[in-house]
Every structure is written in C-alpha cells, then in structure tokens.
Amino acid sequence: MNFSKKSPWILHYDGSSCNGCDIEVLACLTPLYDVERFGIINTGNPRHADILLLTGSLNAQNIPVVKQIYDQMPEPKVVVAIGICATSGGIFAECYNVVGGVDKVLPVDVYVPGCAARPQAIIDGVVKALSILEEKQNALKGR
C-alpha cells in the first residue's frame, strides 16, 4: 500500500477496557471533532490500515488477535496506544489475566495518556503518528 499523508486509514481495536477510551475514539469521528478533516478514514480491514489504534489492556485471549491484526497490516504501519490501560495496563495491571500495556506485545510508536483519553489528545496522537508514518515510508523508499 502506498501511504499518503493526506489520506491515512486507521483501524481501531479494543483490548479489554471499560470502553471509556473507545467512546472517545468514536467521538473523534463525529462532526464535533471531525478527525476526517485530516483525511483520516476509519476502516475495518487491517490490510488497508496505516495506523492501528489500540485501547485497553492486553490479556492472554486477545494477544493472538492483536498480533494477527498487526501482521496483516502492510508496511509502513504505526501503532498508537490510547489510554492508560493500553500504555501500562492501568487499573487492570494487577489482574491475573492482564499482561500489561500494548508494548508488551507490539512495538508502540505513540502513547496517548488519559483515563479516558480525551478526543483532542487522541487526535494529537494520530497527527504525531502521521509524522512517524511518513518517516517510516521515507526509510522504506531509501532501502
């Protein structure tokens, strides 16, 4: 896939969260915050996605799913961990089935803190991800 900074596609996956961050991610897609003004399109297909937005902590059941989604995404790709649960496990970190944040399983490029992360912070994280995505694409071209 040929990434264009003017039309990145995002894919959202909820690990195991309280849904607070998920609601805020969806709020970013509404006309109030309108993340689409940056050309961002939400997709349900990992083969079309440039940016993976992950919310919630990871546990043994969703690790294979998250890895499969990540592996299906074409290069270059960026992972954004949204909310304190995705960054460190949050309040669920001490649970018997939680392995921690997303970075225990996948390489994370951008961390968006918060409980729940605010739409403005999520949009800022996605904009940072665009710069990282552009750097990764330039690195691929330089090979």
Image (spheres, rainbow, N blue to C red):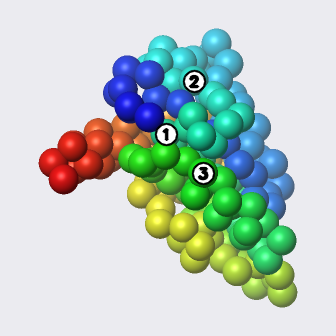
Q: Amino acid at mark 1?
A: Asp
Q: Secondary structure at mark 2?
A: strand
Q: Is residue 127 left or right of residue 71?
A: left
> Horizontal and vertical percent for residue 131?
30, 40
What residue is disc 3 on? 72
Q: CA distance from mark 3 to mark 1?
A: 11 Å
The amino acid at mark 3 is Gln
Q: Residue sitting at 72 percent across and 70 percent down?
A: 63
Q: Are marks 2 and 1 in contact (CB under 8 Å)?
A: no
4, above or below 79, in the image? above
Local crowd size for mark 2, using a 10 Å CA cut-off: few (<14), some (14–19), many (≥20): some
* Residue labelled with disc 1: 50
With 111 as the anchor, is 90 left or right in this view? right
The answer to whether any part of residue 96 appears in the image is yes
User: Relative to residue 92, is residue 24 drawn left or right?
Assistant: left
List the residue tagged with mark 2.
41
Are the residues at dot 3 and dot 1 in contact (C-beta closer than 8 Å)? Answer: no
As displayed, is residue 92 above or below residue 79? Answer: below
- Residue shown at 42% from the left, 48% from the top: 75
Disc 1 crowd, CA 10 A, few/some/many (<14, 14-19, 20+):
many
